[in-house]
Image (cartoon, grey):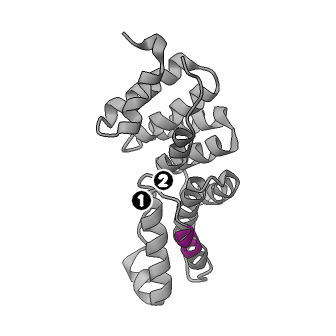
Amino acid sequence: MDTRIPHTLARFAAIAGLAACTLQAPAALAQERSPAIRSAISECEHAARGGGDNPRALGACDFALRDSSLGEQERARLQLNRAALSAARGDGRSAMSDLMAAQGLLGELPELHLTLSAAQIRTGDFNGAQASARRALELGLEPSHLAHFNRAIALERLGQYDAAYEAYREAARLAPENALLAAQPRRFARHQP
């Protein structure tokens, strides 16, 4: 069995944590804000939802977070989005900082735990990443294949290959159109017919 996790796979873990973790600001508040702030909030949300390494969107998040009219929930959601973008860039420490700040206000959102698992993978906390991905599943994360994927990466890094194989297999089953996920179970030669 090849136990080396390809670089692209580890990078995708951070990106997987970006799924659907954004919520729109209430329309009444958004209309009162300047067009620049509304645009920055929108750019931050859309980029986090899109799941890529986008330095401009990270700057938009920073700009929006400087707006003093943000409510606590909006601020926490922007921090969650910024954490997702930081994780995608490989900056697990910044992502963790934003997630910890947002968690007190957002509570037990499954998306928060998914993004937390991605940040923990980036910082090498594989036990924490596995637990956070499992918690996202317990909270009903949809689509759930992303949490299974992050959990699989963490389990593989912990040397728990049988459990990692099962988690990869479940992720691939839930998202059969995703070529990266479909390829992961095939890396485990021992489990092949």
Point 59% across, 23% down: residue: 3
**Disc nearer the start of the sequence (1/2):** 2
Q: How far from the left and from the top, in percent, is residue 176?
A: 30, 35
Relative to 119, residue 65 above or below? below
- What predominant SS class does the magenta segment belong to? helix
Q: Quadrant of residue 35?
A: bottom left
Point 55% across, 21% down: residue: 2
Q: In this rendering, which labeled residue sits more in front, label 1 or label 2? A: 1
Q: Are marks 1 and 2 in contact (CB under 8 Å)?
A: yes
Q: Nearer the viewer, residue 4 or 157?
A: 4
Report the Cα–Cα distance between label 1 and label 2. Answer: 7 Å
Q: Quadrant of residue 25?
A: bottom left
Q: How far from the left and from the top, in percent, is residue 97?
A: 69, 57
Q: Amino acid at mark 1?
A: Gly
Q: Nearer the viewer, residue 133 or 152?
A: 152
Relative to 77, residue 154 above or below? above
Which dot marks residue 114?
A: none
Quarter of the image with the C terminus in it: top left
Q: Residues within 10 Å of mark 2 (few under 14, many from 20)?
A: many
Point 65% across, 32% down: residue: 127
Reading the image, the residue beneath label 2 is: 18
Relative to 114, residue 93 above or below? below
158 in the magenta segment: no
Quarter of the image with the N terminus in it: top right
Q: Secondary structure at mark 1?
A: helix
Reading the image, the residue beneath label 1 is: 50
Q: Amino acid at mark 2?
A: Leu
Count of numbered circles in the view: 2
Q: Which residues are magenta?
A: 55-61
Q: Nearer the viewer, residue 52 or 187?
A: 187
